[in-house]
Amino acid sequence: MKLLKDILYGVNITAVSGTTSCDIVSVRFDSREVQNGDAFVAIKGTLTDGHNYIDAVVKAGARAIVCEQLPANMVDGVTYVEVENGNQALALMASNYYGTPSKNLKLVGVTGTNGKTTVSSLLYQLFKKAGYKVGLLSTIKIMVDDTEYATKHTTPDALVINKHLRLMNDAGVEYCFMEVSSHGIHQKRTEGLVFEGAIFTNLSHDHLDYHKTFADYRDTKKILFDQLSKKAFALTNIDDKNGLVMLQNTKARKYTYALKNYADYRAQVLENQFDGQLLKINDNELWIKLIGCFNAYNMLAIYASAELLGLEKIETLRLLSELDNVDGRFQYYISKNKITAIVDYAHTPDALKNVLETISTLRTGNENVITVVGCGGDRDRSKRPVMGNIASEMSNKIIFTSDNPRTESPSEIIAEMEAGVEPQHVKKILSIENREQAIKTACQLANDNDIILVAGKGHETYQETNGVRIDFDDFKIVKELLNSLDK
Ligand SMILES: CC(=O)N[C@H]1[C@@H](OP(=O)(O)OP(=O)(O)OC[C@H]2O[C@@H](n3ccc(=O)[nH]c3=O)[C@H](O)[C@@H]2O)O[C@H](CO)[C@@H](O)[C@@H]1O[C@H](C)C(=O)N[C@@H](C)C(=O)N[C@H](CCC(=O)O)C(=O)O
Ligand SMILES: Nc1ncnc2c1ncn2[C@@H]1O[C@H](COP(=O)(O)OP(=O)(O)OP(=O)(O)O)[C@@H](O)[C@H]1O
Ligand SMILES: N[C@H](CCC[C@H](N)C(=O)O)C(=O)O
Ligand SMILES: [Mg+2]
């Protein structure tokens, strides 16, 4: 039980009906979860409006209603609080309810189109290896030191975030690394969190279904930096043309990293092989297990953050070379006949291009690159032809297939990818809706030494169609198929 007025601390309140000196059991924003004594926050969403459910939650026993407009029919004994913004109120209430847990640890947010999971997961690994208790909020999982929790979002809702930060406090966690998605920022899921630092990886084409314009997408990411305190650090990649934009209005201490431009933290790729690469970071050479130029950026961001968080330099360099790749990111298997199958979470044009470029630098002879790729349904449609174009330009054979179709028609998604293929590449294309069948065909087509890239789903262990998820694991499937086909 918590006092409503304490939970509302910091919220922009515009009107109140009833008393805020009442006890609240839990804070909820979904009417279907409300129980006796709860506070319900009405949120205007993308599909429906939480205000439509106020009567229902009052019947279910809600003690307080937090909303953007007081309803006409208010019930005695229920407190109604009108606020400026429901999303913001929810985030501050969640933080207050759980005792502002972000203040009790060093929280670092990672934002950008690609690389958030990689950077935050590797920072988690690094600080664990350095002997600390660490937390992680990522696309793949939530970690409260060694305890794993499942997650549905890259940046979960404010109640889930603060609940897990609280668990981290209870477990004595000192550092927490979290992915901050643009949806998360826009829906104010991270509002009220106290960040020790923020990292910007890069910005490229994604989520234009939600943000409509690239400028809006960029400016949303920037809010993470705008909200930092002057004690915090703001670390940005200035090889990205939007890197400096992130620093424009921040009060935080500003730091830059780059491979091409002059920056506070610099790296150079000296050697690139299948099992790793040799990097030079601020005059120190080190071998890392992750490959690809994009991972040189990720490693540099990790090195810089570790230094800014006070880790000793030499120790950090030693530990960086021990870090293992993250599940579903350039995860590879080499078959009996030396066919290399790579599973990668590239689901944006830039990621797909980077992965295919990395593969091309690793080719030693005239082995073929066979790419199996699809695009998710109910997500940015405009990236489909672009990804279709990149796959067809940079591979010898391409099989378009389904990713997570969600509520869209798989054949229509594939047709939108095919529309991006230039006429001279059309003969390299096959389209097979069934993803397992598509992967099987790639395995059948592969000759000794060929490379198969299965892109888009990485670590995901399901495929979602019309709200139903079936078990599906690209890595497991491609490995089993290569073995069963005796390849
Ligand atoms: C488009 C989007 O981001 N939607 C998120 C949003 O839901 P919404 O705005 O659509 O909510 P809504 O369905 O319109 O409902 C409005 C309100 O009414 C409430 N409601 C609704 C029905 C009802 O019967 N009773 C009721 O009270 C809802 O709980 C909600 O508070 O708020 C919900 C609660 O936080 C999220 O679960 C939901 O994520 C959906 C499922 C989703 O797929 N989101 C993806 C796109 C996303 O957020 N992805 C990013 C990663 C992007 C990246 O990789 O960069 C992420 O951080 O995961
Ligand atoms: N720094 C980077 N720059 C460009 N591409 C990258 C970078 N790091 C990773 N990638 C590519 O992007 C894919 C996704 O990487 P990762 O999961 O780390 O990104 P993310 O930002 O967490 O994505 P999401 O938005 O889905 O959470 C990887 O599989 C790889 O292909
Ligand atoms: N976080 C990304 C994940 C995309 C992964 C891809 N497999 C898909 O389902 O579209 C998104 O929600 O857009
Ligand atoms: Mg991620």
Image: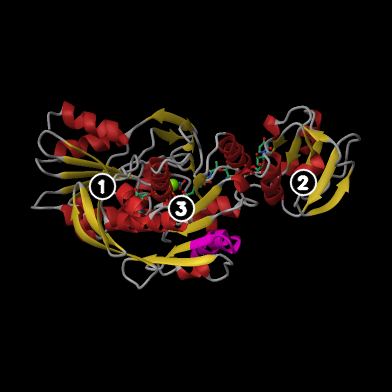
Q: Does the residue labelled 3 lie within 8 Å of ligand 3?
A: yes
Query: Which residues are drawn in magenta?
Result: 212-234
Q: Callout 1: helix, strand or loop?
A: loop
The image shows a total of numbered marks equal to: 3
- Residue 469 vertical placement versus 256 (above, below): above
Decide if residue 88 is on the left or right side of residue 411: right
Q: Nearer the viewer, residue 119 or 278?
A: 278
Residue beneath label 2, please?
A: 8
The residue that disc 1 covers is 289
Label 2 sits on what residue type? Leu
Mark 2–mark 1 Cα distance, whole angstroms, equals 47 Å
Give amino acid for label 3: Asp
Residue 277 painted magenta: no
Is disc 3 surrounded by few (<14), some (14 to 19) or many (20+) residues within 10 Å?
Answer: some
Residue 66 image position (x, y, % from top left): 77, 44
- Quadrant location of the N terminus? top right
At horizontal 67% and vertical 42% (from top left) the residue drawn is: 94
Whole-percent x, y for residue 278 in the image: 22, 56
Q: Where is residue 16 in the image (x, y as percent from the top left)?
A: 87, 48
- Going from N to C along the chain, the mark reached first, 2 or 1, is 2
Residue 32 makes an appearance in the image: yes
